[in-house]
Amino acid sequence: MKRHHHWNGLTEAERGASVAMGNFDGVHLGHRSVIDLARRDGMALGVVTFEPHPREFFAPDSPPFRLMNPEARANRLARLEVDQLYELPFDAALAALAPEDFARTVLSDGLGIRHIVVGADFRFGKGRAGTVTDLEALGRRFGFDVTVAPLVETGGVEISSTAIRSALAAGRPREAAVMLGHWHRIDGEVLHGEKRGRELGFPTANMAMTGLHLPKLGVYAVKVDVLTGPHRGSYHGAASLGVRPMFGENLPNLETFIFDFKGSLYGEHLSVALVEFLRPELTFDGLPGLIAQMDADCARARTILAEI
């Protein structure tokens, strides 16, 4: 999959795709249905999305809400065999484009779109003034077809990023996975930490949660994909998502202990899937109590993961 960060300067081979357009936060089953409808014989499959998320642009001080950072979204879309990912820069200039100007300048002149699929609730252009009916009319003017994908439900409940956030905030990652169609994953680079885990006998891979919606804080059974470096592969583990109250810190991060693993992962990229919530964050009277609990957490996580 090739990633693009603008609609200008594309080669002819990079234009003319059949695309799905939206924010695709989480790449859940509803998003998957939109993408699947964009598959056309003889055309490259593309996704048109925006970076940053428009909500981040208009309300930069709002609490983090994203289920995925751009890296995680790109990784998931690549697994869906998307050929071209157009991550359009959402800035003041793009936000100011009227619906007609967006369709002409970005979709037609820039990307050369031949077919586009959007969800039934899609809005576009300045002030979100453009509707799917407007997009269909503009497609007829500028030479691209438009398909409107119906909303997707599971168990009578509409699948949405909001519902997935609620499930994760409640510590129900399996419920979120049903709506996502995959485990909720946190992707990113392994950063240097305080190395306390190593001193306790549980060396961890530390990852930042900057800009991301926080699932319920606590300890999880996790599946881990090492995406880069000499240790590439899939592993099982246990991860602590939180602020480390035992040590008086308050910046959330993800610390993952990978079972039966030896080697350095600093600077490598991981994808950590939350499988099951084990317990909330706790404080202990001393390190022996913490270590005993970590042993119990890992034993329980091994049992859970062995059954998947």
Image (cartoon, helix red, strand yellow):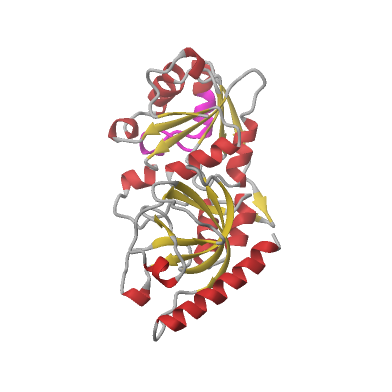
- Residue 121 at least partly seen: no
Q: Quadrant of residue 157?
A: bottom right
Residue at point 45%, 15% (across, down): 11
In the image: residue 107, left or right of residue 33: left
Residue at point 48%, 13% (across, down): 12
Give the camera-side residue of 159 and 130. 159
Q: Is residue 299 above or below residue 69?
A: below
- Residue 275 at least partly seen: yes
Residue at point 50%, 43% (across, down): 230
Q: Which quadrant, please, contains the C terminus? A: bottom right
Q: Is residue 275 above or below residue 109?
A: below
Give the camera-side residue of 130 and 229. 229
Q: Quadrant of residue 95?
A: top left
Q: Is residue 129 magenta?
A: yes
In the image: residue 283, left or right of residue 44: left
Stretch in magenta: 121-137
Residue, far bottom: 285
User: Residue 4: percent from the left, percent from the top?
Assistant: 42, 27
Give the camera-side residue of 271 and 201. 201
Q: Is residue 226 magenta?
A: no
User: Residue 301: percent from the left, percent from the top?
Assistant: 60, 68
In the image: residue 64, left or right of residue 84: left
Q: Is residue 231 above or below residue 168?
A: above
User: Residue 43: percent from the left, percent from the top?
Assistant: 61, 20
Give the camera-side residue of 126 and 56. 56
Residue at point 50%, 28% (across, down): 135
User: Residue 252: percent from the left, percent from the top?
Assistant: 37, 63
Residue, far front: 262
Residue, far top: 12
